[in-house]
Structures are given as C-alpha cells and as structure tokens.
Amino acid sequence: MSKKENDKFIITVKSNTKDLFAFTKLIPNRKKRFQKASSEPITSDPMNELARKLHPRRQYLIVSEIKDETKTTKTIKLIPDPDSNTKELAYFRAGQYLSLKVKVNGISITRPYSVSSSPSEALNGFYEITIKKVEDGYLTKYIWDNWKINQKIISSEPNGFFYYESLRDKKEIVAIGGGSGITPFRSMAKEIAEGKLDIKKMTIIYGSSEEDDIIFYDELKELESKNPEKIKVVHVLSCEEVSLEGCEKGFINADIIKKYTDVNNSTFFICGPQIMYEFLDKEIEKLNLPLKRVRKEILGQIKDIVNYPGFPQDFAGKTFNIKVHVGNAIKEIPALATEPVLVAMERAGLTPPSKCRSGECGFCRSRLISGEIYIIPESDKRRAADKRFNFFHPCSSYPLSNLEIKVPRDA
Amino acid sequence: MNETSNIQKINDSYDAIVIGAGNGGLVAAAQLAMNGVKVLLLEQHNLPGGFATSFVRGRFEFEASLHELCDYGSTTDKGGIKSLFDDKFNLDAEFIEIPEAYRLILTDPGEDIDVTMPFGIENFLDAIEKEVPGSRNSVKNFFDLGKDILHATAYIGKSRGNPDQKVLMQEHSNFLKTTAYTVKEVQDALNMPEKARKILNAYWVYLGVPTNRVNFTIFATMVYLYVRRKAYVPKNRSHEYTTALDAKIREFGGDIEYNTKVEKILVENGKIIGVETVNGDKIKTNHVISNASPTLVYNKLISPKSEVPEIALKEINARTHGVATFVVYLGLNKTAEELGIKEYSYFIYNKGNTEELYYSLGKLETPNVQATICLNAAIPDCSPPGTCIISITSAFLHGVWDDVKSEDYFELKNKIAEELIDNFEKAIGASIKEHVEEIEIATPQTFARYTGTYNGIIYGYEPEPWDSFIPRLSCMKDEKHIEGLELCGGFGMRCHGYSSSMKDGETAGLLTLQDMIQKGEIKK
C-alpha cells in the first residue's frame, strides 16, 4: 500500500483521497462530538474525596475524656468537634502520630503524639493519645493545668512511617518502648487483638523507671493473656527495688532482647525518649541487624542540643537575629543558637507550618536566603536538590549566624 | 481564617497568576517572569513540581512519577526540552542519559518475547530485524513518518498556525495523510509484522490508550523522539529541575506562594478578574494560566457558575479522562547487580495486544501491565552504596478506584503492590522482596492528595485521533472560552507527558504575553 517516490517514502493509509478526506473531516467531526456531548457539570471527585478522608489537612476535635494512667500520665480521648466540619476521623495505620496544634499562653505550637488507640477505634469515632508530663515541660504543664472536657483541639491528619509494613517487615516484631514510647505499641497490640494486623507475634519489651510509672500495665497484661500466641510483654525496670514478678531489671540491652526474641527473624520497632535511644543504639548495634529490620520512631525536638555530638558547642548561649519573610510580611525575631529555628518563630508569635518536628516530614520546608545553620545530620531528611538550592527544615535546624529566611504560610 | 492572617498577606494584584506549580505551570511562570511580567505562581502543596517531584524515605530519595524524559537530547542533537532548559532559561539542573530504550517481557505462554531494545534509529532497526526478520522496512517507514510529522509540525509552528495549504500538500503529505488515523490503521498500511508491532508498541503505556484507538501522530513522534534522541532522567530526581525552575522564576522577578490553594477563578462578563484562595487571599488579575485541568477549571474553579460556558462542559464530557497510576517504590538493600537487574526500563505485560492490556486496567485488581524502572541503571549513585531503587508503575482506568473505602485502602494497596512485585520477580527471575528496606505505595488517591488532580488522574484526556495534539492545537482559538484564561499541563494542547506539559506551559506563557502586548498592558 505504500510506494517510493524520489527515494522518499510516501504513505497511503487507505487511499489518497480517503486519507486527505479524513484529515479535512478531523476538525468538523471534533466539533460535532462536542456539540453532541452532555453539558452536565461533573460534581463528584471520589479520589480527592478519599484523600480528604484519609488525609484531612485539619481535624477539629474536642476532649471527651481524660483518664489518669499513672501519676504523671494521662490518656486523652478525642472526638470530632460537633461545632466543626469534622464529622469523622481519619483512619490510620497503628503507630502513626497526630500533630496537635495547641495555643499555649497565646503562642501557637505543634506537637506530634502517637495515637494510642487502635485504627478501628478511629472508625468508631475516637482517637486516644497518652501524654506524659515532662518536668519543666512547657506544653505538658499547660495541658495538666488547662485541658478539661470539651477543650477544642486542632489536629493534623495521621502522619509518619512508624508502622508495620507487611511487604517489608518480618512476621515477628519486637516492640521496644520506653516511658510514653509505649503508646504506638498499644495501638498495634490492640489491632493484633482485633485480628486486623496480620503478624505472627509481637514481643513488647517495655522499659520503665519505677513500677508505678508503667503505663497500661493492666491493659497490656490483658492483651497478653487473651492473645498468648501473639502478644508477649516483658517489663524492664531500672529502679532499685522491684516487686513485680517476671520482669527484667536495669535497662533494655542486647542480652534481654536476645533472651526474649528470635533476633534474626524479627523486625524491631523502637520508640522512647532520647536518653533511651542513646543507650539502646549501642545495644542494637551488637545484634548486627540490617537497617531494614530496625524501625525507629522520630524523636521530636532534640533535648540538650549543646551536648549533642557534632553540635558546635562554642555557639551555646549565643543569640542571633532572624529576618523572616512570610507572605509579604518581614519580621525580625531573636533566636538562640541552641533552639531550632522553628521554635524561635513560634516564640515570636509566627505560625509556620510544622508536623513532625524531627526533620522528617518536610512540612516546614523553608528557604534559607542567607546565613549559616547547623542541621543534625541524622535528622537531615532533605531532598538532594533542596540541599543544593538552600532549602531547609526549620524544625531540625539551628542558627549559627544571623539568618534571612522565607517561610511558607501556614497551610 | 486564622488569627495571624494579618501578617500572612500577599500582594492583592498581579499582571498574571499561574495556578499550580506542575511542569506546565512552572514553565509558564518562568516564561512570563522572564519577559518582565509581574507574575504570581500559586501552589497548594509546599513544593514545586506537581507529579514532577521526589520524596525521602529512610536513606532513599525516590522519583515520584517520571520514567524517562522525552525530547531532551544531547548537545549535538538538542531536543525541545534541552533547548528550553539550557538556551532559554539557563537552568541549573543535570540530566543523565538512560542506557537502553527498554526491555519488553511478555509473560503469557506462547507470547515468547523477552527483548532489550537499544536507542538510536539504526541500532533499533537492526535489533528489531534480528528479532523479527523482514520487519526492518516497515519499522523504518514508521520512524520516517515520525520524522516527517516533526518537520510538518515545525513548519506549522513557524507559520504561527497559518500554514500554506499548498506547502502542506506538497511537502508534508505524510503528515496530512496520517493525522486522522490510529496507530493500528497506519501500521496495517505499513504491513508491519505482528511481532514487530508488539515490540515497537511497548511504549503504548506512556500514552495509556491502545493502538487501535491512540492517534498515530502523537505515538509516532513520541517513539521516534525516544529512539532518536534517547531518554534522560534528572540526576537528583525531578525535584532538582523543578526547584531550579522555582529559583529561576524568583530570579526573573516572579513571586511564588506555596501552601496556597486557589479556590475560585473570578470571571466577570466572560473575562478573568482575579482569583481567591483557601487562605482568604483575593487577588486581582486579568490573566490566569491554569495548570489545573479544564475538568477542574470549568467544573469547580470558575466563579460564579453562570460564567461557565456550556460548550466548555460539553468539550470535557466528550473526552475520555486518561488513566491514574499506581506506583510501588522500593528501596532495596542489595545492588541492582547483586539482584540481577541490568536494565533501566522494563515493560512487563502478559500479552502484546494493547486493547486487552487496556481493559485489564479497568478492574480493581492487579493489572497485567507494569512499567518498572531501576534508577541505579542510569544513575549508579542515586542511592547509598550497597542499595538500589526500583519503582513499579501500573495504571487504572478512570473511575476504577471510586468506591474504595478508607478502612479498606491500606490492605488493598498492599495486595496490589505485592502482586506487582511478584510479577516483576517472576518476569526477570530476581528475588527482591526479602531486600525491601523502604517501601512506599502511591495510588490514585495519593496523586489526588498531593496535586489535587481530578480523580487522581495523572494522564490527561485520551489522545484519540480526533482529540490528539494536532486537532487540539488547531482549535486553540475556537476552544478558548474566557478572555484572559489559558490552560496548560498534562490536560493541555500537547496531551500528556512531562515534555508535552512543559512545552505547553511555554505556549501558554507566550499566548498570555501576546495578549498582554496586544492590549497594551506591557511593552513588547
């Protein structure tokens, strides 16, 4: 059907006349199709609807119950605020956190809290978070003094990557928790008990400093006794006097882990305070685990940054000036070298976006116009191009000079 | 409104506003800013790029959606995108050549194709002749047609859309005579052997329409450009060039606001008068370029509704929305070499019949279609030593995911991801599952979440012959319904794909500029 002319290939698809006719009819036919089509507007968009359900930018909640777990710990039950547009709670994966936006003494801050209730409970209309009162804690003191039933709270969607992933993790998991780091594991254990998390066994190794600091003691015991095949709880107590039976003494270490778990056949989930990570990192190293089998929950803001290995200690005590561009506004604010840029902004009454406060989620991504910053190498989860083009995450960056930065408006 | 909004104000008037910092919007904004237009680019997410982005999990940075950039080319055979980046914008971004065109594996018994095709027209012809003796001539003719079409479109472009009919008839008859046809119709006329078609048409999935319906013109030029100019990927993922474009827009004097979703495009008496954002901004402008699709613009954004022309809705309803994709991103703790993964780009289908493949995307189960890439095959150090990055992409027809409930969502996506991994392992005989260190799974919901694209669609309207880029470009003036409004991107005039979207953004920028000059709003 094709021929060569002057060495140039000339196509004939149907026939010369038909091909050219088809070309000339192309636009008229197009217009006809349009004329014939419906003029009904499209009103549904199921994928954006599902995105809003799974990942609402904000969830408007109220406190419906406050329960004392220990002398320093409360579980706070959150339900949709009936006066808001939040009618249902976003589903999540056990282990994820909510970033709460809280106004403390007139200043807006965010804090990530693991959800301690199970995902199916979110479908039933509530989340629980379990908060430990921190000594000299800015936020927790405020919560203890002020939060009552019906307190309104703004939350993010569920966030984070600290969850069991069947395509990556072993069927046996070891959950190492310290203090309030038990919260995501309560969520996971509840989901296992509900038969909804498909794993063979979860061994919880839970470190507490005193017996009466153990959070969810009775509840964990019940989960264990009702699911003896699947859930095992080992308490590790660091206090001198221990009356609990069957617990380990001291800190969670490699020997304790080996005693209770099949090390080479398990994925390890670790969640606890910074001080536990510092100790545990060395113990985990002894187990020679590939990175894929050690999942660590993010820490939040690093405490005592001055003594953090690698932090330029001679900057301790120094104060700098940050020129912040937000929208059209320019605000000059003071900032301590030992405080993340995000905290300086919040203190100054700005409301920059933030969620994880650990460098991981990138929600606070901002542009460094000029100046020097220190970024904790372990928390530097920036994209390669962001490093090249001077974007940074204020939640995990510390000023080492006066800075000029452009921060996105709050979403 | 939050209480600090008083310090979060932005300017209340711009010469032009670009909605969406995807491929089209970024280039449109850069084009306008370069010409001194006071332009504001608004993006709902906190990053530039739209689909052209990346994300970090653990020690891996994953490319979100790009497989390979078409029409980039080398310094000696520069493509449209390289010209745009290097010559027009002097963009600070590095691109790496991909080693081979693709490896095609058809897995059903009896299909019997496992072939790796090289770049370069002559190399490709040699390889296909070896696989399918006697096919060389028909495939060569296919490429020649691709080349002729490019000449013809270059001529039409130069004529500013008013080509001399005589010149078209005499010099570009190959273009005229194929424009109204599908790939199948032309390949039938070329007497191309069935097996050669299966090999050559492996690229069908990049347009997402089977060969009996996809327009020949767009398919032939795409395949020709890939094979002739090779394909490229950004060295530091797409986030690098999109961030470079962000920097360029600001350098040219343009403004960008992230976290700022446009809620309304304000129209009065058929003319653009401004936009409103969810942040409460009301910004005056006479010119809007929307990277958001016509589907969103006419069904959702234009306000008041009485300003939506009926014909605009008819145009959308007459078209077929393209596919949404499903991607499994894997960070593996073994090297590609250790895993036996040699190629960059794998097309793995159960059959060679694209019509059947297309219909397999219409069910809520694992499709028999995957386009898988191993980034390390092009960029060995894209992940830490001892590791590699693989991403498996499949697709679903518009609407397939519509009834998925949030409580079933995670289980469903994991099931499909697992089967896609199984299919990849079986097809190439590698074992990767036990080496998964990081995994992320993106579904149509995910793409909707991060970009707001209508129903999670990543490809634009299906380019059948009547709605491929030639008819769309030809009808540009007739199908412009609101004064001061241009559209660009994957649902735009050049149909979908990274290169098309960027070129479309450039066109939208130039059209807006022309309009402003004509109206005396800016000097030439």
Image (cartoon, coloured by chain):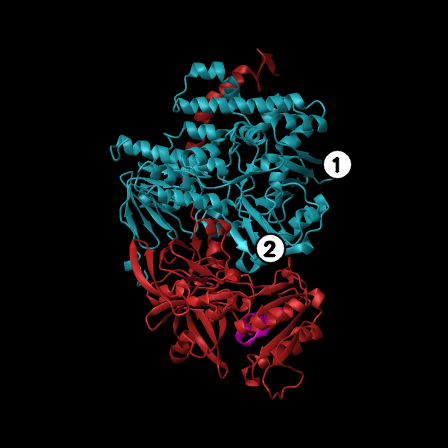
Q: Is residue B492 magenta?
A: no
Which quadrant, please, contains the C terminus of chain B?
top left
Instruction: Give the left or right position of residue A355, taking residue A10 as reference.
Output: left
Find residue B439 and name its label.
2
- Residue B411 vs residue A376: left or right? right
Instruction: Count the labels in the image.
Output: 2
| In this view, A377 is above or below A130 | above
**At 45% from the left edge and 28% from the top edge, which residue is drawn?**
B471
- Chain A is shown in which shade? red
Q: What is the quadrant of residue A3 in the picture?
A: top right
Q: Colour of chain B?
A: cyan
Is B486 above or below relative to A64?
Answer: above
Q: Position of residue B73 (x, y in %)?
A: 53, 32
In the rendered structure, which segment of residues is drawn in magenta?
Answer: A177-193
Q: Residue furthest left?
A: B520
Amino acid tagged 1: Gly
> Which label was assigned to residue B110?
1
